[in-house]
Image (cartoon, coloured by chain):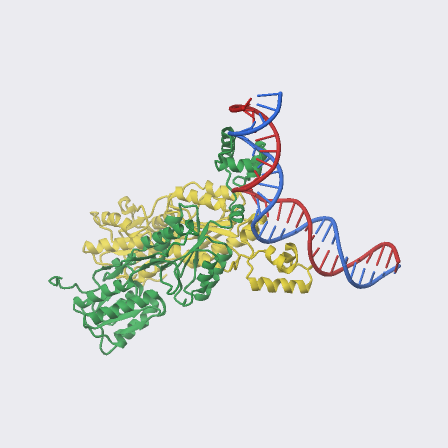
Chain colours: A green, B yellow, C blue, D red
DNA sequence: AATTTTCATGCAAACCTTTGCATTCACTTT
DNA sequence: AAAGTGAATGCAAAGGTTTGCATGAAAATT
């Protein structure tokens, strides 16, 4: 009864010592005698003493908690990142508080306030697709709360960042489409003010230009959200063009499946009539039929590294190290939703 | 500078009042004069005063935090439940601490200890597939921390429970397979000591028996984990039987896709040669080809209700209401991975 | 034997907030 | 004018822990 709620004072009374001695004994303070230490530790063990984190937090002005803000967790992408974060933070002394912004700037600001109020010791954040202004993060930084940005960049914000080279991923994908013989390559892009979206678009544009393939304005559409249903209408629009594309590079796998869905519905054969490539390599993408060609990202590692950097930053608080910028390389995964590129093209 | 870290004392000095007066003014205590109240509130607003949750927690012996323990979040199932939980808890005064047990009993016990140490005000839990003993939850309850169990039951544990009628879901699925003309129906079940797995198996068995369809021991296999790769070997084994099944009812969608994968690989046509039905209705299941027949569960609602019950329980702490048992009804969703049942069978 | 050194422990403050009780002051009542 | 009332505010304790400083006793030095 009352287990786990024993206090230092309780133990002090029991042992006829003062709370301070008990505290020092538990923390192996050199000035405490060995017999006392042993007695205290035994009792603490027996009574399953757990120091009260609130008392500690109050004293040390820190909560031993780190906050994580993500737009959502129902996609494999973010849930895998979070799993990586958990696997690093879990064994540490810190607790994690995961918050969902639902891709809303307003909710994100509210969450930052909530976390700030909680006195979190640091936060990991991937901004919502609506977020253009980063002052809420700056306010945290001014309060000495380190911020690590992951996956989606916050341009102009000075912070540690762990990103993915979306430009390269897109470039690889589009260049491969070109080499495989496609020439009318369309792009289903994401919400416009997201760094990832922008870089994927730029990668697409550059790959087209560098390879002398003309693009058309009507070949580039942007979806409002990242889920399957958000891609259906734009995909339909693209496929209904007079000059039907022979390839679509989609901003992620869900949107790519929208395109596959629509293409099939319109009687197009994949990949004979049209190649489709996604981004993210969600685990089920390989089980679709056709299985989806896509760009793989090291999501789990991304989560782990972000968490490690934050822990390091918290530990070194004060020392004004330069902010880190880590960029992971994504990799093209070719499956059956796109044509094979001719083998004889070498170098 | 130092914003958000203003204390009552700071404001008291500034206004030449005592901290107690400032506190009372902010809490609209009747004994405080209107002028004072106004002045205090204005200053608090200006300085963006945020009461220190640790001081409050220390005083009230509660953390305003609720813990959530789930086996994993990379599947849509649990991430959607968590989204439901968040949507209920988020707007409340409580914070959420999400923890992943990774389907490990040991880690689950560690997490419970961590949350207990944190003095969470309640927990929501779906036990790991290894968990057979629930004393770690009972210890929490003994410390007056309410526990709400969701999706996966903890048989013998007295607590509020929000479950799904897995038996009914399985029964519906299997009876439908029988009516559609299948007679050699196999089952790919989950880890054996999980309530959901057991009930799905029982639903399968009963549907077979009640409809006079014999089952064979060799038709029932159990997988070790819930992901695609865990299902491949068992599916292969099933399909390699001399007496090849003409239907497979899988414990979830991922395992169902393993079966589809293997069936295709072995040259079987779906659903002509073999029908396959899953469980969960993950969002991409409808985009597979063949699109997956499966059993839908109200995951989001399940998350929301669990959270509501916990909040209620925390509020009514002390009053010894009976534990609630809520059971959601799942629904069969018929797509193209299984034969259509003859329309002329009525009543 | 007197003094210094060493060792082990206790006291009290601090962290921030809430709250029961005491205090102060102005105003009303007799 | 004295006493009583009421309103507005302050004091102090509590909650659990850590830590600088002080205290006490015993051991070692002179």
Query: What x and y, as percent, mark residue A70?
Result: 40, 59
Can residue A259 be seen from the camera position used here? no
Question: Is B94 left, or right, of D12 in this rendering?
Answer: left
Question: Is B213 left, or right, of A8 in this rendering?
Answer: left
Front residue of C7 and A264: C7
Q: Which residue appears at 56% of the width and 53% of the height?
A: B315
With respect to residue A166, does A88 lie above or below? above
Image quarter of residue A18: top right
With respect to residue C25, does D16 lie above or below? above
Query: What x and y, as percent, mark residue A259?
Result: 27, 68
Can residue B236 be seen from the camera position used here? yes
In this view, the residue farthest toward the left is: A344
Q: Which residue appears at 51% of the width and 38% of the height?
A: A49
Front residue of A263 and B114: B114
Query: What x and y, as percent, mark residue B162?
Result: 46, 52
With respect to residue B330, does A11 lie above or below? above
Total numbered labels placed on residues in the image? 0
Front residue of B256 and B198: B256
Q: Which residue appears at 57% of the width and 64% of the height?
A: B45
Front residue of C16 and B310: C16
| Quarter containing the N terminus of chain A | top right
| Quarter containing the C terminus of chain A | bottom left
With respect to residue A245, does B277 lie above or below? above
Question: Is A185 left, or right, of A77 in this rendering?
Answer: left
In this view, the residue farthest toward the bottom is: A242
Image quarter of residue A214: bottom left
Query: What x and y, as percent, mark residue C2?
Result: 61, 24
């Amino acid at each position: 009864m009352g287990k786990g709620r024993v206090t230092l004072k309780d133990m002090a009374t029991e042992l006829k010592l003062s709370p301070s001695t008990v505290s020092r004994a538990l923390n192996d303070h050199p000035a405490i005698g060995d017999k006392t230490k042993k007695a205290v530790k035994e009792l603490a063990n027996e009574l399953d003493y757990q120091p009260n984190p609130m008392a500690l937090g109050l004293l040390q002005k820190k909560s031993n908690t780190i906050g994580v803000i993500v737009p959502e967790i129902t996609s494999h992408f973010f849930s895998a990142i979070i799993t990586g974060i958990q696997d690093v933070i879990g064994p540490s002394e810190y607790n994690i508080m995961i918050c969902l912004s639902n891709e809303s700037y307003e909710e994100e600001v509210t969450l930052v306030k909530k976390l700030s109020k909680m006195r979190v010791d640091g936060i990991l954040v991937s901004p919502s697709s609506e977020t253009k202004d980063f002052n809420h993060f700056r306010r945290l930084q001014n309060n000495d709360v380190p911020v690590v940005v992951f996956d989606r960049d916050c341009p102009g914000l000075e912070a540690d960042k762990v990103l993915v080279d979306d430009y390269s991923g897109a470039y690889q994908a589009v260049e491969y489409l070109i080499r495989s013989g496609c020439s009318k390559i369309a792009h289903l892009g994401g919400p416009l003010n997201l760094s990832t979206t922008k870089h994927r678009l730029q990668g697409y544009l550059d790959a087209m230009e560098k390879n002398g393939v003309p693009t058309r304005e009507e070949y580039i559409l942007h979806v409002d959200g990242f889920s399957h249903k958000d891609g259906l209408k734009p995909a339909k629009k693209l496929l209904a063009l007079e000059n039907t594309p022979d390839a679509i590079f989609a901003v992620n796998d869900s949107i790519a499946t929208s395109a596959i869905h629509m293409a099939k519905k319109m009687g197009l054969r994949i990949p004979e009539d049209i190649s489709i490539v996604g981004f993210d390599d969600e685990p089920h993408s390989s089980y679709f039929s056709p299985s989806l060609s896509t760009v793989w990202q090291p999501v789990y590692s991304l989560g782990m590294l972000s968490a490690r950097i934050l822990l390091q930053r918290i530990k070194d608080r004060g020392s004004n190290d330069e902010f880190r910028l880590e960029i992971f390389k994504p990799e093209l995964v070719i499956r059956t939703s796109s044509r094979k590129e001719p083998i004889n093209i070498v170098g």
